[in-house]
Amino acid sequence: MNDDDEKPLDPAAERIVAKVRWLMLIGGGTMLIGIAAIFAVIGYRVFKGEGSVASADVVAQLPKGARIVSTAVAEDRIAVTIETGGAIEIRTFDAKTLKPAGRLRFTIEP
């Protein structure tokens, strides 16, 4: 069969085909907008001007006789576990600025 041999669609079928075309255009447009948004976010994060790098000259003072047990980095925090006089303490610092962010002390019940 040739394409020339096909019969024209009745008006109800033409309305359905037109509606499906509109739905396809809307779906395709939405997908293109979504992909463009993803590329925009990726581009923003790659080219974001985050120029504030912490200097390496920061000194954090520990209590006398304290020793560092462990260190860890998670997201934008640095955690340092310190043992001082039999007590454990966790100090957290902001990874970008290296400023103290918090302190958690553990003691033994008497």
Image (spheres, helix red, strand yellow):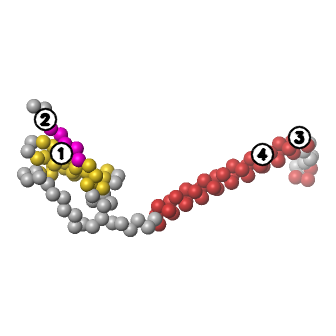
Q: Considering depth in this image, is 14 or 104 the residue closer to the camera?
A: 104
For the residues marked 4 and 3, what is the alpha-carbon distance in whole angstroms? 13 Å
Q: Tell me the number on the disc at residue 89.
A: 1
For the residues marked 3 and 1, what is the alpha-carbon distance in whole angstroms? 76 Å
Image location of residue 11, percent across then percent down? 91, 43
Mark 1 surroundings within 10 Å by alpha-carbon count, few (fewer than 14), some (14 through 19), many (20 or more): some
Q: Amino acid at mark 2?
A: Ile
Q: Considering depth in this image, is 40 or 22 the residue closer to the camera?
A: 40
Mark 2 surroundings within 10 Å by alpha-carbon count, few (fewer than 14), some (14 through 19), many (20 or more): few
Disc with the residue nearer the chain's start (1 vs 2) = 1
Disc with the residue nearer the chain's start (1 vs 4) = 4
Q: What residue would you read off at disc 2?
A: 108
- The answer to whether 7 is drawn above or below residue 49 in the figure is above
Disc with the residue nearer the chain's start (3 vs 1) = 3
Q: Amino acid at mark 3?
A: Ala
Q: Amino acid at mark 4?
A: Val
Q: Residue at x 35, y 52 (%)?
A: 75
Disc 2 secondary structure class: loop
